[in-house]
Amino acid sequence: MTLDNQCKCHQSLKFSIRMAFQPIIDVQDKVIFSYEALVRGEEGQEANYVLSKVTNDNKYSFDQQCRITAIEAIAKLNRSATVNINFLPNAIYEPETCLARVLEVAKTVSFPHDQIIFEVTEHEKITNHSLLKNIFTTYRRMGFRTAIDDFGEGFAGLNLLADFQPDFLKLDMKLIQGISQNSVKQAILSGIQITSEKLGIKLIAEGIETRDDYLFLMDNGIRYMQGYYFAKPALEMLPEIAEYIL
């Protein structure tokens, strides 16, 4: 049996996608740490437009095509960059088989797989926790880093963290926005920081839009940040950040 016949993720996707990139900033060293790859339509339409085309029949091939497109796009722009790539937790058919194509593409475009961070989002209800744990374990064994995206917003939360400890937690923007003026959010962040430090997990704050939130987070030990305050996503480009922002 050929690889293409083993896995639904190798079926052809019936619509085209492109990638936009948004930087994740290391505010301690004042450099761009990574770029998150964000799916866009063929004419640059936003992610919701593309996701509306995803069905139970094509979700495996869609998820695979997102990974492949992101790697091919970042390799054209900067092979030394790190890239964060989202995956749908319920769209992995068989981890090693689905990753085989990803590794093949990364090798073809000479993009090191240790510069790839795979993020699982909490927005989609995870129906099979044991499969997700297997996915994360397989990714780590094959040299990829992992992240839980939108932590604190969705379905998985602490239960997912109890099952698997990723390299990064990306803090949901609803927790982060306005945190400089909100003592409750500050207390919640403090608890997450204590937990992540004990587990050896790095934190990334998402949704930074104001200088006040940026300064508060920096002063309270958050090293990695992402948001419109630094740069908006750019279609098939790697945005830079102005020095005065930091």
Image (spheres, rainbow, N blue to C red):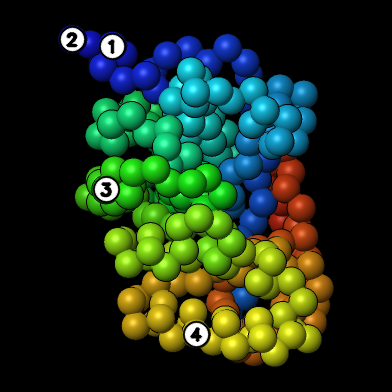
Residue at 71%, 22% (x, y): give it: 42
**Mark 2 Cα within 10 Å, few/some/many (few <14, many 20+)?**
few
Crowd class of label 3 (few under 14; some 14 to 19; many from 20; radius 10 Å) = few
Q: Estimate the spatial distance between the alpha carbons at disc 3 and disc 2, rounded to whole Å.
A: 26 Å
The C terminus lies in quadrant: bottom right
Q: Are the residues at dot 4 and dot 3 in contact (C-beta closer than 8 Å)? A: no
Tell me which amino acid carries mark 4. Answer: Gly
- Residue 18's disc is none
For residue 65, side relative to residue 10 (left or right): right
Q: Tag on residue 191? A: 4
What separation in Å lies between label 1 and label 3 (alpha carbons)? 24 Å
Q: Give how far apart the Cα atoms at labels 2 and 1 are.
A: 6 Å
Residue picked out by circle 2: 1
**Residue depicted at x 45% and y 57%:** 156
Q: CA distance from mark 2 to mark 4?
A: 50 Å
- 200 and 108: which is toward the camera: 200
Disc 1 + disc 3, Cβ < 8 Å: no
Q: Amino acid at mark 1?
A: Asn
User: Considering the numbered disc 4 on the image, is that residue within a helix, a strand or a loop?
Assistant: helix
Residue ID at (70%, 89%) = 183
Find residue 32 and report its horizontal and vertical position in percent.
Answer: 60, 62
Say which mark, if any, is on residue 5. 1
Q: Which residue is mark 3?
A: 130
- N-term-proximal mark, 4 vs 3: 3
Q: Nearer the viewer, mark 1 or mark 3?
A: 3
Helix, strand or loop under label 1: helix
Of marks 2 and 4, which one's residue comes earlier in the chain? 2
